[in-house]
Amino acid sequence: MQKMLLGLAAGLLLIAGWAGAQAADASGIKAIKQVSETEKCVAPKEEMRRTHMQKILHQRDETMYKGVRTTRHSLQSCVNCHVAKDDKGQAVDINNPKHFCSSCHKYTAVSIDCFQCHNSKPTDPVVTQPIVGNPDFIHPVPLKSSAEVSQ
Amino acid sequence: MSNTEQPQTCQCDGDSCDNQRRNFISKTAAIAAGTVVAPGIFLHQVAQAKNAAEAATDAVRWGILVDTTKCADGCTDCIKACDERNGLTKENRPEIAAHWIRKVTLRDKATQKENSLPLMCQHCEHPPCVDVCPTGASFKRPDGIVLVDKHICIGCRYCMMACPYKARSFVHEAITDQKAHAPRGKGTVESCTMCVDQVDQGGQPSCVTGCQHGAMLFGDLKDPESAIAKKLKEINSVQLRADLSLNPGIRYHGL
């Protein structure tokens, strides 16, 4: 138990340290837009730091087994909003230490395999209009545009 | 003896009994039409377009009818549409390339008649690939689409052995620049997904829309009013290897 608490404290310190480093560094990785005036990310920043993994892993099973296609916690939507650019203005991929996810994961010694399959760059045009009924529904790949893009 | 007993009679007199039943039926109909699952979602819409937040149900079963009499010999439009949509690149290493859909020529040994047809995952009702999977990665969605959950696929390839249609491929090499809607990676098995993310949004598989000859028809096999169900009622169609009793969701006309 003591070990766990120590671990937790170390983890939090690490993240706090990372956030500090980001704040100190003027070129810290900014997301390309905010969800709303009050909410910058899909949940408050503090909550995201602690529980983003649960959110994405839950979404993964919802999508995979049930075909739920909401985008709030979709992995693709994180990637579409948290875009880091290199010196040439091109979006960087996960191998680049500047990539949003790897920047913090490197610091906190987390290694994920997600981007062996998932594209870590915002490849598709992000739609902002909901498609079917649900105002929460902003699919990264609109039906119409996938045909347009291929032309 | 029980069969000599009086037939069961209704407690009330015939007329009011009938009325009650009619009342009951019309009320249930009203409820069915108006039941709100969540704001803006009505139960009776399930069979048409699924809301993004809604789970796929077994109220539908997706299927494709292939008209082999229209499928042109040597045409690979469906394959091209599939490759493009799902980011399957095969130009540099054809021997290990993934195939989600192939063009196959069947020849009747007795008559020598040849038929050209597209062959992909047949989305069986009783899929052998699901039976043999040791991790549960190979699974069937309630709406009949058979998928690999690559998150728990260990790449053992039992499913590839079990599939009588040779529909599955193994990814041998690291992949980069995948399509955002079709994550793919080394060490896992994959096959036709019926373009599941498009279908979830009320769209159709890309092979179907990519076919220039109108040889493929996609739809809900369970809805008697759907175009595919009507067509299946009208024309002859077969399932490949029907002898295996897998009840595939893909049917072929003209074989």
Image (tube, helix red, strand yellow):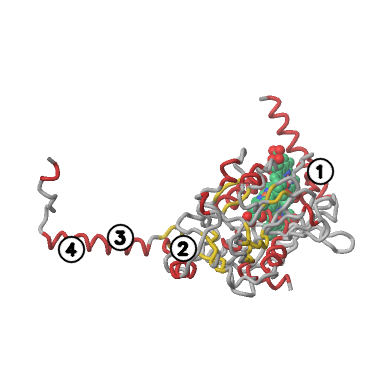
Q: Are marks 4 and 2 in contact (CB under 8 Å)?
A: no
Same-chain check, marks 4 and 3: yes
Q: Nearer the viewer, residue A9 or A109?
A: A109
**Cα gap from disc 4 to disc 3, whole angstroms:** 14 Å
**Lower sequence index among marks 4 and 2:** 4
Estimate the x, y position of residue A32 in percent, counting from the top left: 74, 62
Considering only vertical position in the picture, is A68 above or below A13? below
Q: Are marks 2 and 3 in contact (CB under 8 Å)?
A: no
Q: Which mark is residue A106?
A: 1
Residue at the spot 78% in from the left edge and 52% down from the top edge: B96
Quarter of the image for residue B66 reads bottom right
Q: Quick check: B121 left or right of B47?
A: right
Amino acid on which the number 2 mark rests in the picture: Ala
* Residue indicated by mark 3: B28
Q: Chain of mark 3?
A: B
